[in-house]
Amino acid sequence: MIEFKYMCKSTGAQNFLFHSHDAYEIYYFHSGVCTYLISDRVYRLAPGDLIIMHGMTLHRANPDPAVEYCRSLIHFDPRFVRRFFNPPDMVDLLLPFHRLKNYRFRLGGKSRQQEVEWLLADMSRYYTVQQPLAKQRFLLLFLQLLIEIYEEYQMTDHAAESPTEKELIVQRVISYIEKHYAEEISLERIADELFLSKYYLSHTFKDVTGVTIMSYVMNRRINQAKICFLIDPDLSVTEAGYRVGFKHLSHFSRVFKEKVGMTPEQYRKWVRCRAGIDMPL
């Protein structure tokens, strides 16, 4: 129900893929130099930044490989939170996720950062330990973290900071892809639509995101196929591939397995089992 990774560190060239999941996510940036992409938003991170994500939105970290990159991650099922932490007479602690969807908080002041970092450190102590009350202590600390996020949501001016010229170009590219990913799409077509040279467009996109434009298109199509299966587990693999822009089933199956780690049919069966559709009697 809650997956927690504390102070994950990496250096050197890493292949951080665009990905999505139906779990909600809390991401805390400890140190490094990193650009973070969520859908068409580009965030230049600073230590102490905390990101919340609503689920099933493509996102990717693009850290500088020359600097150690350190972050903490929490994935959780919102149904679990509602079950334990949201009685009728209490504040809805998931409201920031519902209202803001995907958002970066810049924690104000060292004391605010320290409070969150102390909570994460304490959570790490109880996450894997096998002793009485460890799980309860972990859940209480997680509840306190959600309260901190809710309070930050109440205090924060939610106006977005001004993006750089390159980030604006990336946002325009992703917005265009969002409207046309199910159609025949090419670098030439995007460049013509945005009145930019192919070289400048592809170089700028790769510089900001760490991936090529056509790689992003494939990730977006596969992400939408996953959403199609989640919405309609009875949807055929052929129809799902066609809806998201693939003209050939073999190509769709190959790219899907490459990105997701299983074939479309295996993913469809997994969704059906999770929903109880194919559970044995």
Image (cartoon, rainbow, N blue to C red):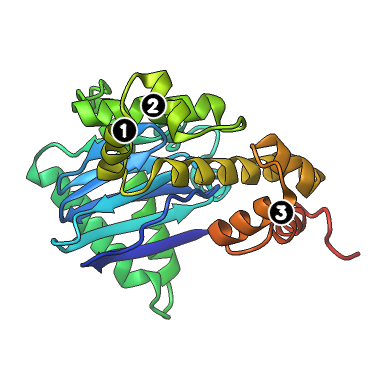
Which quarter of the rendering shows the C terminus?
bottom right
In the picture provided, is 245 more to the left or to the right than 68?
A: right
The kind of residue on which mark 3 rests is: Val
| CB-based contact (under 8 Å), mark 2 and mark 3 | no
What amino acid is at disc 2?
Answer: Ala
Residue 132 position in % (x across, y down)? 43, 77
Residue at the extreme right of the image, as rendered = 281
Mark seen at residue 201: 1
- Residue shown at 71% from the left, 45% from the top: 229
Q: Nearer the viewer, residue 158 or 165?
A: 165
Q: Secondary structure at mark 2?
A: helix
- Residue at image position (21%, 49%) is 34
Q: Is residue 25 visible?
A: yes
Q: Which amino acid type corresponds to the residue marked 1 in the rendered image? A: Leu
Q: Quadrant of residue 141?
A: bottom left
Residue under circle 3? 271
